[in-house]
Image: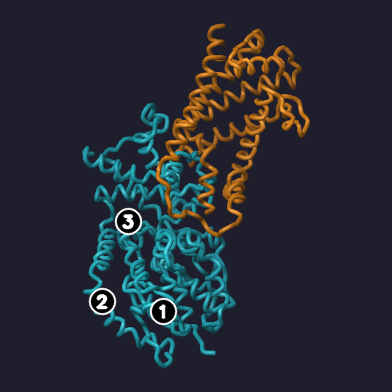
Chain colours: A orange, B cyan
Amino acid sequence: MDTLNYIILVPMVYLSSAIFIAGMIYRITSIFKKPVLTIPLRIYPEKNPVWLYTLIDTFLMPQVFKAKPVMWYFLIIFHGSVFLLIIGHIELIQMFDIFQIIEHDVFLGKGFIGLSLFVSLLYFLFRRFTPQAKHLSVLEDYILLTLLLMTVILGSEMDWARTWFGFQEMTVEDYQTYLKSLLFFKPDISDVTYSGHSFMLVFHVFFANLFIMFFPFSKMMHAIFTIPLNKIRRG
Amino acid sequence: METDLREDLLKAFEGKLNQTITMYLETCSRCGICTDSCHVYKSMPRPEYSPAARAEVIRKLYKKYFKFQGKLLPALGEARSFDDTTLDDLNRAAYSCTGCRRCMTHCPFGIDTQQIMSIAKLMLVVAKEEPEILSMLADVSISKGESIDMIKQGFIDGLKRLEKDVVKKWKLEAGQIPIPTEVQGADILYVALAGAHSIIPAAAVFNAAKENWTLSFFEAVNFGAFVGDPAKTKLIMDRIINEAKKLNVKEVCICECGTAFRVLKQMSGKQPFKVSSITQVHERYIKENKIKVAKNQFNGVITYHDPCQIARNGGVMDEPRFILSQLTDEFIDMAKRAENNYCCGGGGGLVAMGEDSHDFRMKSAKVKADQVKATNASLLVTACENCHSQLSDLNKYYNMGVEVKFLSSMVADALIHD
């Protein structure tokens, strides 16, 4: 069991990170090596400045708000929560003053960010089974949502245990020790594998590893291409 | 499918994979927000009429032949190989899409389904499975460009027969020619369609505005774009570009033809002339007091159908409304207007396919007919030949009870002297 824990918490993390970084570089460079389409594909009316409307389209999705308001709320909650969770995970490695503009404990959000993410993921997953979306959906869509859902449930449970139920066996400092050790290539999993809750971390990292490995080869690349494509639409 | 054909199709596919199209193919999350944007789906709610579903026909082939995921684990994205049903699927996807790009306005990523469908159309051309009539019409346009000197005199003789109708609409001043051709250094080269209705009203308005204009020998419509053949599209477009350069004109004015306007405006690259639609030119004439039009000459409520390629995809949305505000006090917009307007259902070559596409065109544009009926208008105005034909067909099919008119002909009919 210890060996399995170690494999998931150390070599698999390095492997998934390497696949993610190499995959992203390969995918992005191979696309940007392709010929540029010179004809404009803009949609009118023109709105200036283009860069501002591109960012509004990308991050606020006004088109979705008009077309599907319920979905818009979940998309905004989901993406907003992901952003805050990324900050939370960075803080699990190292605290930065810039993130403390609004003072908060690590992990930020008092457990409600994970909950929001969980609810929005359930919405995304269930809507895949509605007749309109089911016809469009492929296995990749269900797998990505399931991996994210599992990662979020297990990650949130660790957070909820600490913040809602005062579980103090695995502290922020313990996570920081583990993550820093990975970052500096001196892996140490001792602080995060002794507790009864350690299995949650192991599974959380396992599903996250799978998701990260799959990321560059999936539709998740929309995280990169949405800005250039919205720019093309804006002209 | 034969190996040679498959290789040819893949070559054509690969040739279309520029940065933008590749990102379109990589990015779609199949959220389905685009589904309700499509007039075809709104009129006939079948899953295959979702824009994302049409794009998936191409995307699944892309995954199989051009993407690591599809090669390693094809089941993940339902990657598919070419088989005996592929060409039928491509045909259904490509020719159930009018290229109106309404879905693009709602897509959170800005994916242009028309661009993805251009891959399907090109593969159908390569397989010689495209609608034959569209290729034939494109070839006729190209051969006209190649043998213009032989047909020039016949064209000029034909114009002579239209002159009295032009004069009937607007009396000429001394020295004015009703329909001038080959005017070196003209301010405007007007590119019409092959039909008197596209020439007579436009000529009357140019003459009323005392414009230094000349008529092109070529028809504006680009059947190469309809059939999705880039080489033919360019050849047809180049005829007009070369004529404009030869005559050294300042502006090329495209008649009421959405595809012709968009192709020349957006695909011709940097040219020494400006490209305008006739609607823009008429708006300019009214604003600059070059022409005057009578108000309320047309009875009843008037509504306007925005041609997709001129409005959403060409930026001409305020101009027709300004012109109509000068022609009537009883203008009413449709509930979804301008860039948000539903396609008439006749674009992408469907109208040119005539009776072959009639049933689909009528059924797929029910939402348009409902949109028009809801205005209670008696006059339905548009600024595109395709839209006019389709709306006239819809008028009969759905008993819409409107008269369908070209905006330019209304301007010509309303011309008044100072």
Q: Residues within 10 Å of mark 3 (few under 14, many from 20)?
A: many
Say what secondary structure mark 3 lies in. Answer: helix
Outermost residue toward the right in this view: A103
Q: Quadrant of the C terminus of chain B?
A: bottom right
Chain assignment, label 3: B
Q: Is residue B187 left or right of residue A54?
A: left
Q: Secondary structure at mark 1?
A: strand
Can you give x and y, in whole percent of width and height, for residue B8 in the image? Answer: 26, 43
The residue beneath circle 2 is B152
Quarter assignment of residue B53: top left
The residue depicted at 46 percent of the width and 49 percent of the height is B112
The mark that comes first in sequence, 1 or 2, is 2
Looking at the image, which is closer to me, B84 or B152? Answer: B152
Coordinates of residue B391 in the picture (x, y in percent): 42, 66
Q: Which residue is mark 1?
A: B213
Tag 1: Cα neighbours inside 10 Å, few (<14), some, or many (≥20)?
many
Who's the residue at 60% across and 56% down the image? A48
**The quarter of the displayed image where residue A206 is located:** top right
The chain identifier of the residue carrying mark 1 reads B
User: In this rendering, would B337 be left or right of B18?
Assistant: right
Q: How far across and how far down the image is residue A207, in percent? A: 54, 21
Q: Of B395 and B351, which appears nearest the observer?
A: B351
Q: Are marks 1 and 2 on the same chain?
A: yes
Compared with B8, A16 (above or below) is above
Q: Kindly report the distance in space between the C-alpha atoms of the residues bearing marks 3 and 2.
A: 27 Å
Residue in the picture at 34% in, 70% down: B243
Amino acid tagged 3: Val
Q: Circles 1 and 2: CB distance less than 8 Å?
A: no
Q: What is the residue that sits farthest to the bottom in this orientation? A: B174
* Callout 2: chain: B
Residue type marked 1: Trp
Residue at 33% across, 54% down = B230
